[in-house]
Every structure is written in C-alpha cells, then in structure tokens.
Amino acid sequence: MSIGISDEHVELASSLRKWAASLQGIDAVRAAEDDASASYDAIWAAVGEMGVATIALPEALGGGDGTVLDAVVALEACAHELLPGRLLGSVVAGALLARAGVPVPADAVVALSLGSGPVWDAAGATHLLAGSPDRWALVPIDAAVLRASRGLDLSRRFATLDSVDLDGPGAVAAPGLSAELVRRTAITFAAAEAAGVARWCLETAVEYAKVREQFGRKIGSFQAIKHLCAEMLETAEAVTAAAWDVAAAAGDESADEQWAFAADVALVTCFDGAVEVAKSCIQVLGGIGFTFEHDAHLYLRRALSLRGLLGDADEAALRLTDRAVAGVRRRLALDLEGRDDAIRPGLREQVAGVAALPEDQRRTALVETGLLMPHWPAPYGLGADAVQQIVIDEELAAAEVTRPDIVIAAWAVPTILEHGTDEQRERFVRDSLLGDIVWCQL
C-alpha cells in the first residue's frame, strides 16, 4: 500500500501519479543526461502551478495549509514517476524556513545545504539555505561559491559548496534551525521519495514476472522469483510504514523526541530498503534491467542518491539501540475518525467478560469469542477488518488480557482454512487455537 491511508490521501496520490506521469519527466531526464546545469524549468513551472511543493506551508505564506502527511503523500506519488528537479529540496527548505519564520520572496528558488555534503538543487537557484551546526541563514546564491556537478542521480543536479558568507548583503538569519533539525526534516520528506521508488520497483518487477517466459513458463512461477518478489514486497511495505510514521511524528510539535525516534527508524529502514528493492527489481528483469534504455537504473540511482545524502544509518541504529536499552518506546495513536464508535462498546463488554475469568480459562474464552485471531473468518475468528482489529488490540491491552502466541499455527492454519477440507478444518483449527496441537517448521 502507499503512504496515504485515508480516502483523501489515496485519491490525492492517484491524481498526482497521473499528473506526474503526464509531465514525461523520465524523457526530460534522458534529454538532459549530459547537462550538469539542467534545472528542468518546464517541469518546475508545472509543479508551481499545481502547488505540490507548497502543500504543507501555511496559507499566509502562499501554501496549501496542509499537513506533513499531505506533503509526503505528494512526494511519494511524484517519486513513483521519477519526477525530476528540485521538488524534494524545495519542500524541505520551505518547511525549515516556515518554521524559522523567514520570509521568502515569491519568485525565489531556494537551494539547500544540509551542512555537509552536496548542495541540493543549485541549478537555477536564486537563494541558498545553509549554515553551521547551530547557525543558519538564507543567503543570495551569489554569496556562495559553488561547483556544479552531474551526480549519480540523473534526475537531480547537485553542487559542491566551497564557501558561503552567512553575514553578507541580503543574508537573513534563520533562528531556531540546527543541523539536527535540518537533517531530521530532510529525512522526513526524503523517506517518502524512498517509498515511491520502492513501490515502482516492486510493481515493475511483479508485472514483468507475470509476462516474461523462460523454459516455457512464466518466470513468476519459479520459486526463486516468487521469493525475491515476496521479499521486495516485505521491504517496500516496511519502507512505506516507516515513511508514514516519521511524517505523522513530524506533525506532532509537542513530541519532538518521538519525531527524532521515528526519523532514526526511517533512516535505518527507508533508504537501504529502497536500494535493495531497486536492485532486486533489476535482478528480476534480468538482462533488460541492466540496459541504459530501461528505466530501472534511474530508480536505482535515485535510491542510491537518497541513501548517500541522508547520512549514516549505522549511527541511527546505535541511537535506536540506546533508546531500547533506556526503555524508550515509540508511542503510537491512530485517529480512527469515529469508525470505532459503533463497535467499541460491544467489544469492550466482551473483553471484560474474558478479563473476569481466571487466567487458566482465558484462552478458551478468547477462542470461543473469536478474539484470539479476530481476522480469521468465523467461526474461528470474527472476520475483523483493520479498524476492528485495532479496537480489539486496544481493549485487550486496556483490560490487561494477553493473547497466547500460537506461533507457527498462525502461518499453517490460514492455509487449512482457505484450501483444506471440512474434515481438516474440524481436525486442526480449534485444537491449534487451544494449544492442543503445536506446529513446528522443518
């Protein structure tokens, strides 16, 4: 699934994918392959007209007054179509400047330095947001000495920053910004691009595996390809989930530490994950995937570039380890938008009945009520949808009722439910739930 999970976000993503595809960005990338100063002005003009780069900015600043989640849904959709140019850098710079309260001229085109590494989107820029660990400013582009370069990602242009004058004419201080805040903001929005890249690579590989024949069979029927595509799906879903979570955390200004936590998870998960999915896509494509004519290498380049720009995932992993040791956890709360109102009272009463039983009787009660595996079909579960499952989890946790882990039965029994005979279901399902049958994997 994509980052967008609400109906509005799903529709936004679908519309923006179609719009981005209509701009034929990949054709523009190939046409500008050898141009180190390519700024993709025609595409940037279309982005400006659509308002994609300013979705999350306040209306008073000319933005769409949306949320961080709105912006990342848009970024994911545009990355899925490999929209070239300065969209990501502009979204990051815009969010930072809005946070710092720095006014930006309406016709400004802002390049971005993260404090180290390449400058983002220097081609065609009028201003540069740059700084040191705790001192940042928006300066005219002429205040910086830059060397343009054509990097690994052919859809973007970067530059090397030799020097910058943060106190010269036209410089505007950006109070409240720090290297850590800049880095975290960049991770938040770049993770969405990683999700878009991973999704395109997954879809491309799966579609190819369905039609490519070898040895008289579709290659998707081969176990090695099945496993590769399954692993791609698993990784792409993890990338998407981490990208969604860091965006959700960034929107909660009262929980800065939680945002830092989610940003480290995204740094560890999203960029390595996108690279692995892109590489696996090329593997599934086989020979054609290694050609310059196929688009797969352009997505791999975008993924590799994102990973290189955002820093060391190993350091983030160590910070996450320190948090785990200290007992710090990611606090999650989902807004169910009232969809739980009708079902929560009944489920709460049902759970209370289980909680009132002695400990040794609870498992049987969980099985009989369908609460042990609520997503399984009746009579063994409740056929619960996503909202019902969340409510059940919350109510069981509130009542301090722990569901026993049925371990490998959770994998084996669904196969019996879907493909087994009535006799097999009668023999295995209930006893597996009760723990009278224990499964192992050889």
Image: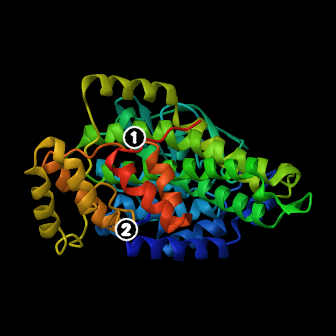
Quadrant of res 359: top left
Identify residue for label 1. 263
Residue 18, can we see it?
A: yes
Residue 108, can we see it?
A: no
Measured along the vertical axis of the image, is residue 392 above or below residue 312? below
Q: Position of residue 242 (x, y in %)?
A: 44, 47
Amino acid type at image mark 2: Gly
| Alpha-carbon span between mark 1 and mark 2 | 24 Å
Disc 2 crowd, CA 10 A, few/some/many (<14, 14-19, 20+): some
**Contact, mark 1 vs mark 2 (Cβ under 8 Å):** no
Identify residue for label 2. 63
- Residue drawn at point x = 60 percent, y = 47 percent: 122
Amino acid type at image mark 1: Ala
Measured along the vertical axis of the image, is residue 163 above or below residue 382? above
* Chain-order first, disc 1 or disc 2: 2
Q: Is residue 313 left or right of residue 208?
A: left
Secondary structure state at the residue bearing disc 2: loop
Comparing 188 with 217, the one in front is 217
- Residue drawn at point x = 25 percent, y = 31 percent: 328
